[in-house]
């Protein structure tokens, strides 16, 4: 599963997409401004663009596994509670398998 997630993240990082001026002006980039966005943006954008995250569509277990992989293999500091739950809830709800907030070309 980790190998599949890494491959998906790697491939999606290569997929360019346009960002509108409104998205560029947002305090949280392309992240949708919903509960948990502040924590998710702070942790995710510390190492890479929030756009990389927004391209993914994972289940809750998939997000957990990806975050564990980043800690174990990419030297990310573990996200402590209560932030861990807020980040995980945010990613699952807003960037789940149906990817309701996938950044679209406009």
Image: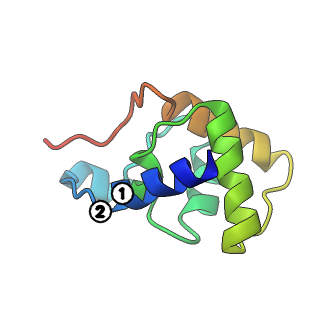
Whether residue 96 is situated above or below residue 43 in the rendered picture = above
Asked whether the viewer can see residue 27, the reply is no
Which residue position is annotated with label 1?
11
Whether residue 97 is situated above or below residue 75 in the rendered picture = above
User: x, y (%) of residue 101?
Assistant: 38, 34
Which residue position is annotated with label 2?
14
User: x, y (%) of residue 58?
Assistant: 54, 36
Check disc 2: other Cα within 10 Å, few if <14, some if 14-19, many if 20+: few
For the N terminus, give its image quadrant.
top right
Q: Is residue 37 left or right of residue 71?
A: left
Asked whether the viewer can see residue 1, the reply is yes
Mark 1–mark 2 distance (CA, rounded to whole Å) = 5 Å
Q: Image quadrant of residue 98?
A: top left
Secondary structure under tag 2 reads loop
The residue closer to the viewer here, 31 or 51, is 51
| Scheme of image coloration | rainbow
Check disc 1: other Cα within 10 Å, few if <14, some if 14-19, many if 20+: few
Q: Residue furthest left?
A: 106
Q: Is residue 97 left or right of residue 37?
A: left
User: x, y (%) of residue 43?
Assistant: 64, 61
Question: Which residue does the image show at 29% across and 51% down from the upper left?
Answer: 23
Number of numbered callouts drawn: 2
The residue closer to the viewer here, 74 or 104, is 74
Q: Do the residues bearing badges 1 and 2 touch, measured as CB atoms within 8 Å?
A: yes
Whether residue 25 is situated above or below residue 60 in the rendered picture = below
Question: Which residue does the image show at 58% across and 70% down from the upper left?
Answer: 46
Q: Is residue 101 left or right of residue 57?
A: left
Question: Which residue does the image show at 45% across and 44% down from the upper left?
Answer: 56
Secondary structure under tag 1 reads helix
User: x, y (%) of residue 93?
Assistant: 56, 28
């Amino acid at each position: 599963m980790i190998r599949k997630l890494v491959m998906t993240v790697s491939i999606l990082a290569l997929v360019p997409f346009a960002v509108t001026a409104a998205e560029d002006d947002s305090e949280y980039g392309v992240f949708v401004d919903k509960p948990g966005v502040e924590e998710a943006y702070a942790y995710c954008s510390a190492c890479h663009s929030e756009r990389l995250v927004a391209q993914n569509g994972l289940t809750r277990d998939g997000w957990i596994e990806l975050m564990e992989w980043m800690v174990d293999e990419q030297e990310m500091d573990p996200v402590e509670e209560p932030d861990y739950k807020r980040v995980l809830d945010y990613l699952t709800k807003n960037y789940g398998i149906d990817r309701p907030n996938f950044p679209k070309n406009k």
